[in-house]
Amino acid sequence: MKNTFTFVVYTTVVIVVMRLEDEIKQVKFANDYQRAMLNIMFTANWLEVGVSQLLKKYDMSSQQYNVLRILRGSRPNPLNLLDIQERMMDKMSNATRLVEKLRQKGLLTRIQCPTNRRKVEIEITDKGMEVLKELDPAMDQNDQLLATKLTTDEVKLLGDMLDRLRD
């Protein structure tokens, strides 16, 4: 007769949550609203740093990346500078300067409108599309960070709450 052994392995998963208080070394806030506001600002900066690190290899800022994504979304239709500014996530960005830097890199073109000399049409180039195509998997992987931290329902709720905050 054979001896049979059964092994039971217990594992414990420990999730470490870095609270705002620990991150900024502040233990007391005026109220929960102040804590929430600071937490939103801190987290936005934390996310921005992650994106900036991905874009660093391409010598591109997150604002430049945003311009390229806007132009990709409008393709094949060109946009003017005002259209781009209205769609940008960072409304304080200098869109003229961003567009010029991207033009110098060959990632977009600026063409003066033949019917209205004051209007400039801006389009993403094939090179710009290639850069975005190369960046897409890394950016998608970065977006999946939320999936490791929050459930689908929590992500939906978070998005809805942030929309409501800006309303």
Image (cartoon, rainbow, N blue to C red):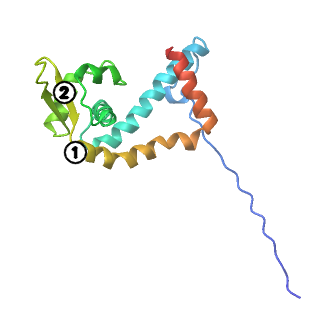
* Label 2 – label 1 distance at C-alpha: 16 Å
> Relative to the observer, which residue lies in front, 5 or 159?
159
Which image quadrant is residue 36 in?
Answer: top right
**Residue on which the image places disc 2:** 121
Crowd rating for badge 1 (residues with CA inside 10 Å; few <14, some 14–19, many 20+): few
Q: Amino acid at mark 1?
A: Asp
**Residue 165 place in picture, x, y as percent:** 53, 16
Q: Looking at the image, which residue is at 14% across and 24% down?
A: 113
Secondary structure state at the residue bearing disc 2: strand
Secondary structure state at the residue bearing disc 1: helix
**Residue 20 place in picture, x, y as percent:** 54, 27
Closer to the chain start, of discs 2 and 1, is 2
Q: Is residue 19 left or right of residue 72?
A: right
Q: Amino acid at mark 2?
A: Glu
Q: Looking at the image, which residue is at 60% across and 40% down?
A: 16
**Compared to 9, does 108 lie above or below?**
above
Crowd rating for badge 2 (residues with CA inside 10 Å; few <14, some 14–19, many 20+): some
Q: Which mark is residue 126?
A: 1
> Relative to the observer, which residue lies in front, 113 or 69?
113
Q: Is residue 35 left or right of residue 99?
A: right
**Compared to 139, does 70 lie above or below?**
above
Position of the N terminus, as image quadrant, is bottom right
**Compared to 61, does 36 lie above or below?**
above
> Relative to the observer, which residue lies in front, 74 or 98?
74
**Residue 156 place in picture, x, y as percent:** 59, 31
* Residue found farthest to the bottom: 1
Q: Looking at the image, which residue is at 10% across and 24% down?
A: 114
Which image quadrant is residue 103 in?
Answer: top left
